[in-house]
Image (cartoon, rainbow, N blue to C red):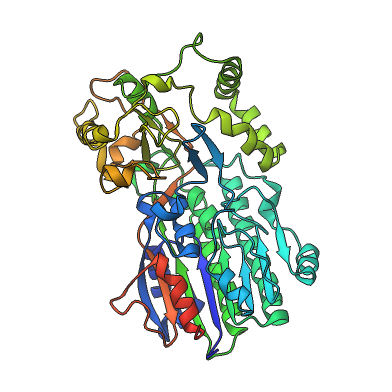
Amino acid sequence: MNTKVLAIGVDAAESTLVRRMIEQDELPALRSLLAGGRWLEVQSPSTIGSGAVWPTFLTGTEPVEHGIYSEWKWLPETMSLRRYEGHHLTPFWKTLAQQEVSLGVFDVPFAPPVGITRGFEVCEWWAHDSTATGLQAGPDHIRALVSEAPAHPLSANRFTATTPDSKSNLGELAAACSAGAELRGALVQRLLEDTQPEISVVVFPEVHHAGHQLWHTVASDHPFYNGIRANGQSALKDVYRSVDRQIGKLVESVDSAATVMVFALHGMRPALGFPAFLGPLLCELGFSQLATWRSQTWSSRAVSLFAAAKRHTPTPLKKLYYQLTPSTATYKLARPTMLPAYDWQRTRAFSLPTDQYGWIRINLIDRESQGIVPLDEYEELCTELEQMLLTLASEDGELLAREVRRTANGAESGRVNPLPDLVVHWREAAFTPSLKIKGSNVSAQLVSTKSTGQHKSPGFCIYRGSGGIGTDGVVDAKDLNRAIMAGCGV
């Protein structure tokens, strides 16, 4: 080993905001790190889905190989969804652990535990993207230290009622994220001092969580936020500053010769919820067909009734439900209701549940267990869908789709593609609350309107070390792990 490596992820920190705050001397730790290092752009597969970025980082492979694009995974063999649990992914540090390299891993999103015995491993002390497996820590003495530490303020699930214009709740959310970052930093610093790992990978998810609900506090002039009071104008910046302070303490806790990198795999941009009309639109245009009541099994009918009851539950009761129900239970209850009951023998393409983009899956023979689209019709159907989406417009003539991306390179690749076949990137017109789609009777409603921030590319990395990472100023997310290992001479 040549030197130690400390890699700190600031999940979903927006590069333009970070640069601006550095220039205004609001992030002194990052400013100091950048003065002795380099700024790199991080390219990641966030254009497919935000759920793809961390699996790409921790496996060093592309989404088409690891198959993850969301916290929910489509199962073609059962024509259903399953909550992501990460068991099939192998983090790059597992091989290092088997070589008895001492490691420190703390809350890397989407990463399963690998059984580190030299150093420390903590999963989901508090996570924005939970795999629903709960807190896991090791070895035994680390588990004891973690169990003695104060709980993260966000663990109590008290902020599900937060809305963009709720001043007190937004302030409390920001304060909880900042306090959580401070507790996280103190705990990680204790673990670093106790175990002295050769390679450490530590992630702060608080910026990610705050960014989704507080982005309007740093972009209040955006048209999306017309009519929303710009309460708590420093709320999100306060979280960034808190994380910066903890980064400074962690950097000070390692040797000055250590390789240090602070990175975000993607960033944030303005939003106000996301469009939820793609599924109904595909039904209206004949690409999908819902099952009739008579054609459904009794179990499918029960799920349909439960889903209808959820949709019509008053908002205050929904908020109370999410506050009182453990996340593991809500995931189990949500899974069967996230897709409508389709008549698969009459469905050629269907929409998958999404948190940002539009996702379309082709009901392909020999890939989906109830597929009906022949392989030789795959590309033709993809083209038909693309043309429909790229000409989709509002009644005012504004186009709704900015671009439509294919995730498979041709029919043969599509035959084994685990991802949505088409990814729709919406224009801002698609986020209009009063949107009426030209020539359609589909209600173009927005959902999750408490989210004022959504993901964007690129990410960034501030790198201080002697390695040859990103010689052209750009590094791919799947190559960051190689830079971490090279920094330690592995």
Percent across and percent down for residue 232 are: 52, 53
Which quadrant holds residue 355?
top left
Q: Residue at x 60, y 14 (%)?
A: 298
Q: Residue at x 41, y 65 (%)?
A: 478
Q: Nearer the viewer, residue 113 or 164?
A: 113
Percent across and percent down for residue 379 are: 23, 38
Q: Nearer the viewer, residue 207 or 369?
A: 369
Does residue 245 show up?
A: no
In the displayed structure, would residue 405 be above or below residue 114? above
In the displayed structure, would residue 375 be above or below residue 93? above
Percent across and percent down for residue 171 are: 59, 52
Percent across and percent down for residue 185 are: 64, 70
Which quadrant holds residue 389?
top left
State the quadrant of the N terminus: bottom right
* Left or right of 419 on screen, residue 133: right
Q: Residue at x 46, y 12 (%)?
A: 292
* Left or right of 331 on screen, residue 371: left
Q: Residue furthest front?
A: 366
Q: Residue at x 42, y 55 (%)?
A: 65
Does residue 116 show up?
A: yes
